[in-house]
Image (spheres, helix red, strand yellow):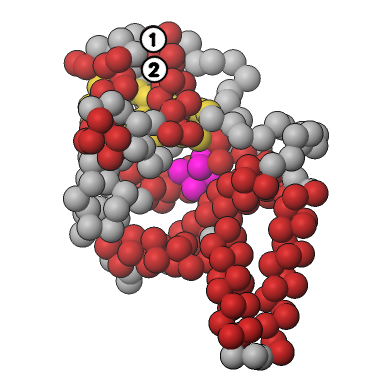
Amino acid sequence: MVTPLEFFIVSKVGWYLVAPSHLLVWMAVATVWLAARRHAAALLPALAGALSLLILLILPVGDWALRPIENQYSRPATEPQAIDGILVLGEGLNGEALRSRGVPGVGPDGGTLLAAAALARRHPEARVLFSGGPSDIGGIGVADAVVARHVFTDLGLDDSRVSYEGRSRTTLENLMLAKDMAQPQPGQRWVLVASAYHMPRAMLSAARAGWSVTPWPSTYLTAAEGRQHHLSLAANLAHLDLAAHEALGLLAYRLTHATPGPA
């Protein structure tokens, strides 16, 4: 049985090693090392890296990889007339910006907070619960929940409506600890707000937590169909990294049985 702390550390270190953008760096390092030893095999990682960069420059590989993940869940065709609760997941907000500058840093996932605040305004009857702790291995960083509180307050969301869970380090812990706080009752409708690319892993975690939620994806990074017209190596790599991160995360969740809850 894998403990939450073990799962968290392995996932962080493992991702550092196998992220597609990092693999290009490892190829470059291998090329330099082998060339310094006058090894003929230095040509192999060099060619592999050059070919990978060429493909990423010409073809929207990142979008091709990310689009199927974002398309797995969509919002309900008709918005529910009444909602009991809105669960919002932390996805790596920039706590260091808040600590050093006094300004909350939302990064590329700020759309999730905007979507949750808009949904909360339309449904004043709904409770709001944000779940997200520190994302660093040491656990000493600013929790996503702290950043989210500042953002929701700036957006005019009444603080008395929102509960914050700031200990969770993984998506599974997000759902398990949030469920402990929410104590959802049979028949209640809870809406899960998360980035579209993160929604498959979030819904898998919700199922493992035994919590029936309605997906409310936000922060789409790809079109539902079609080809990317303005190619960018940086955007391609970023989307490819996200797709690989979520795909590997889903695989890890299915292959392991991490015990939920705090370490």
Residue at 80%, 49% in the rendered image: 58
Q: Can you give x and y, in whole percent of width and height, for residue 3 in the image?
A: 28, 66
Asked which secondary structure carries label 2, the reply is helix
Q: Which amino acid does label 1 sit on?
A: Arg
Q: Which amino acid does label 2 sit on?
A: Ala
Structural crowding at the residue carrying mark 1, measured as other residues with C-alpha within 10 Å and reported as few (<14), some (14–19) or many (≥20):
few
Residue at 79%, 48% in the rendered image: 59
Is 10 placed above or below 104 here? Answer: below
Residue 26: image quadrant is: bottom right
Q: Which of 1 and 18 is in front in this view?
A: 18
Is 233 placed above or below 255 here? Answer: above
Q: Nearer the viewer, residue 5 or 190?
A: 5
Q: Do the residues labelled 2 and 1 touch (CB within 8 Å)?
A: yes
Q: Quadrant of the N terminus?
A: bottom left
Q: Nearer the viewer, residue 70 or 108?
A: 108
Disc 2 designates what residue? 117
Disc 1 designates what residue? 121
**Is residue 247 visible in the rendered structure shown here?**
no
Structural crowding at the residue carrying mark 2, measured as other residues with C-alpha within 10 Å and reported as few (<14), some (14–19) or many (≥20):
many
Q: Can you give x and y, in whole percent of width and height, for residue 104 in the image?
A: 30, 28
Left or right of 200? Residue 124 is: left
Residue at 41%, 62% in the rendered image: 11
Q: Which numbered circle lies on residue 177?
A: none
Mainly helix, strand or loop, the magenta region?
A: helix
Write down the region rendered in magenta: 198-202
Residue at 33%, 44% in the rendered image: 174
Asked which secondary structure carries label 1, the reply is helix
Residue 49: image quadrant is: bottom right
Is 229 placed above or below 202 here? Answer: above
Is 70 placed above or below 136 here? Answer: above
Residue 31 is covered by the magenta coloring: no
